[in-house]
Image: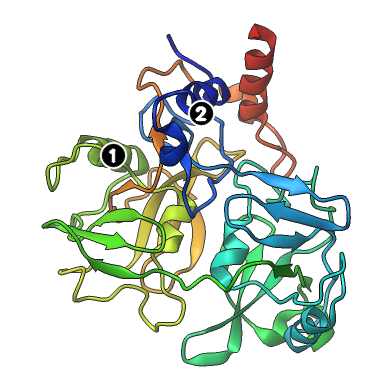
Amino acid sequence: MLLPRRRFLRFAALLPGAAAVLRAVLPDTGQTARHTRTFGEDSDYAGAGPRLRDNGDGTVSDEITGLMWQRVDGGEMTWDAALAYARDLRLAGRDDWRLPTSHELFGVLNHGRNRPPLDTRLFERSDAEYWWSATTRAGDTTRVWVANAGGGTGPHPVRETLSAGGEKRIHALCVRGAPPSPGPRLGADSPGTVKDQTTGLVWQSEAPAEPMSWDEALEYCSRLNLAGHGDWRLPNIKELRSLCDDAAARPLPSALFPGFHGGSTWTSTSENNRLDRAWHVSLDTGLVTHAMKTERLLVRAVRGGGAVAGPREKPPVDPELFRRSPGKSKDAAGKRRRDESAGAR
């Protein structure tokens, strides 16, 4: 029987040891919509959360990461002003607010939502086009990592925002409650694999040299048998982004990834309101953006990290669910599945 993803999550939580399995450092992407009948896309795996709580005092707590977020961002300002704003912020009786690291900021995004990629039931909607992080680009302090309202991330010039004479609205969204995340801590694991001690994810160390389409990438990872394991998958957008060390000029250490082929690498996460586009990460730069699924990009498989696979048998995708104006869909297909699930209870 094919269970809707939310019901599958509740079912999985009842399994012996499931609480430990579902606990992970990385929050899930929030994507629940089906975009293909090919098994292995983002929504075929249940991760941890997102699990956010409105504290009723102007803050939102992330129960996965332990971070507390400002519910209403501070508005558009220069990066220097944003650093000072965070330092001086007094909110909910707390005075230890800061700008998030690039990984923390990307971690709070919800890729089941569009413009903004935040849960607006909890976060106040604003006119932000981007949000500042505290992380400068390695070797270039004139560029700072930002998350954008479309769901991507990249290092932008500090002078791009309106208050610095630019044309973009870059806002400050502050965080507190846990030490800044250290980024990836990579080490050799079983033969042919690399483990990240920060996330618990295990990575294929030597990836295929030949690029693939998105569906081919899903199939390749699902069929991979490596180091005695057959539960490999194409990483979702947060998993692959977590592999990038923003403090390094080149995100991946070549000693751990022999024959490393830099360039754009597929994730299992589709652009939420599009059937024909998926997200990818440049493992040369850490930049996150999207491409048509027919394009041929690089592939690197992952396993572990607490993800629980759902049923491999999937019904056809209804393209009508995705025929909406860009930027206005809020996981329409996923909502239909949740409504169907609610109706069945």
The one nearer the camera, 86 or 141, is 86
- Residue 254 picture location, percent across and down: 22, 75
* Picture quadrant where residue 162 is located: bottom right
Quadrant where the N terminus sits is top left
Give the residue pinned by disc 2: 34
Of the pair 319 and 187, the residue shown nearer to us: 187
Label 2 secondary element: loop
In this picture, is 227 found above or below 91? above
User: What's the residue type where badge 2 is placed?
Assistant: Arg
- Which one is in front, 211 or 96? 96
Q: Is 170 left, or right, of 297 in this rendering? A: right
Please tell me how crowded label 1 is: few (under 14), some (14-19), or many (20+) other residues with Cα within 10 Å. Answer: some
Q: Amino acid at mark 1?
A: Glu
Does dot 1 land on a helix, a strand or a loop?
helix
Q: How is the image coloured?
A: rainbow
> Which sits earlier in the primary sequence, circle 2 or circle 1?
2
Image coordinates for residue 21, horizontal then vertical, percent = 41, 39
